[in-house]
Image: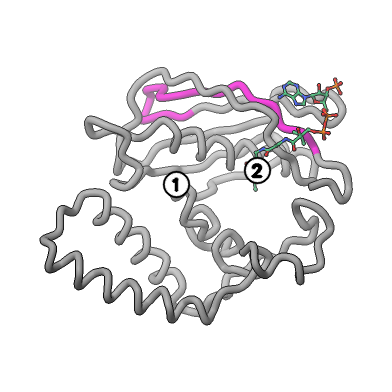
Amino acid sequence: MSDSSPTVPHEGGFRPDLDISTERGGPHYAEFSEQVRTLMDKARFACPTDELAVEAIAVLSELNAKLDAHLVDEWTTPAGTRVDLPARGNLTLPPYEIEEATPEGVLATVWFRPYHLGGNGVTHGGQVAVAFDDLGGMASLVAVNGVCRTAYLKVNYRSLTPLNTRLTIRTWVERREGRKLFVAGTLHDGDRLCADIESLFIELRPGQA
Ligand SMILES: CCCCCCCC(=O)SCCNC(=O)CCNC(=O)[C@H](O)C(C)(C)COP(=O)(O)OP(=O)(O)OC[C@H]1O[C@@H](n2cnc3c(N)ncnc32)[C@H](O)[C@@H]1OP(=O)(O)O
């Protein structure tokens, strides 16, 4: 949250000791998160009457005002740190579940929801890149036990990526040259390759943003 960040002690772009949690946000945070994703799905496909739009504006404005009183900084928000939830509870990421994360690589199940629609019933290419960026970053992080940033990410879209389907995504460090980690990855629908990546992640120096 930009207006609170100046007051937050900051060691660089990331904190090496970022807290993770399964409890932050309380026992209903998972359902809260799911309802927000469902709202996004509905918003993507709904064509409300003007009356319903006005009603929705009132409900959402009231809710947003209530949430305003409970905003925290990025280091303590449940979104991104709730490791028990899909994509660590980060609503901006396509939901995924980690099957395995070792220095040899990351294996996860990812699924794209209705709100990830690109066109003609399939997933937006940018959303595929988001999944690869996060999980490529995770493969780098686990391989070097330190935070990395994406320098480049090339996605080869080999075939259409379906929505609402559990897909297999893999990322791994193929080669390391000092702080440079060349990360490869694949996204499969069953046996069919949907996309693969060629990417470079750079291990951050201590305190580097
Ligand atoms: C689990 C949680 C995972 C979350 C993952 C999320 C990942 C992200 O989304 S990060 C956000 C997107 N990325 C960014 O915003 C990065 C913006 N860029 C930067 O901050 C910097 O350019 C950064 C950090 C990538 C590199 O800067 P810096 O640390 O100063 O390294 P620098 O000295 O320039 O380069 C190091 C080496 O990498 C090479 N390099 C850097 N960028 C590139 C590039 N784009 N292409 C090719 N080579 C590159 C350099 O040539 C150099 O090579 P060598 O050592 O052989 O001379």
Q: Does the Cβ of the disc 2 residue fall within 8 Å of ligand 1?
A: yes
> Which x, y percent locates residue 114?
28, 46
For mark 1, give the secondary structure: loop
**Over which residues does the magenta segment extend?**
187-203
**Disc 1 versus disc 2: distance between alpha carbons?**
15 Å
Please say whether residue 101 is one of the residues in the magenta stretch: no
In the picture of the structure, the residue carrying the numbered disc 1 is 94
Q: Which mark is residue 138?
A: 2
Assign a secondary structure to mark 2. helix
Quarter of the image with the N terminus is bottom right
Tell me: residue 107, above or below residue 51.
above
Residue nearest the viewer, comparing 187 with 51: 51
Location of residue 198 with respect to 51 vertically, above or below: above
Residue type beneath disc 2: Met
Residue 16 numbered tag: none
The residue sitting at 44% across, 43% down in the picture is: 110
Q: In x, y percent, where is residue 103?
A: 72, 38
Determine whether, in the image, residue 112 is placed left or right of residue 177. Answer: left
Report if residue 188 lies within the magenta region. yes
What's the residue at 52%, 81% (across, down)?
69
What is the crowding at mark 2: few (fewer than 14 residues within 10 Å), some, or many (at least 20)? many
Tell me which corner region of the image, top left, top right, bottom left or bottom right, holds residue 123: top left
Residue mark closest to the camera, 1 vs 2 = 1
Left or right of 106 on screen, residue 123: left
* Quarter assignment of residue 125: top left
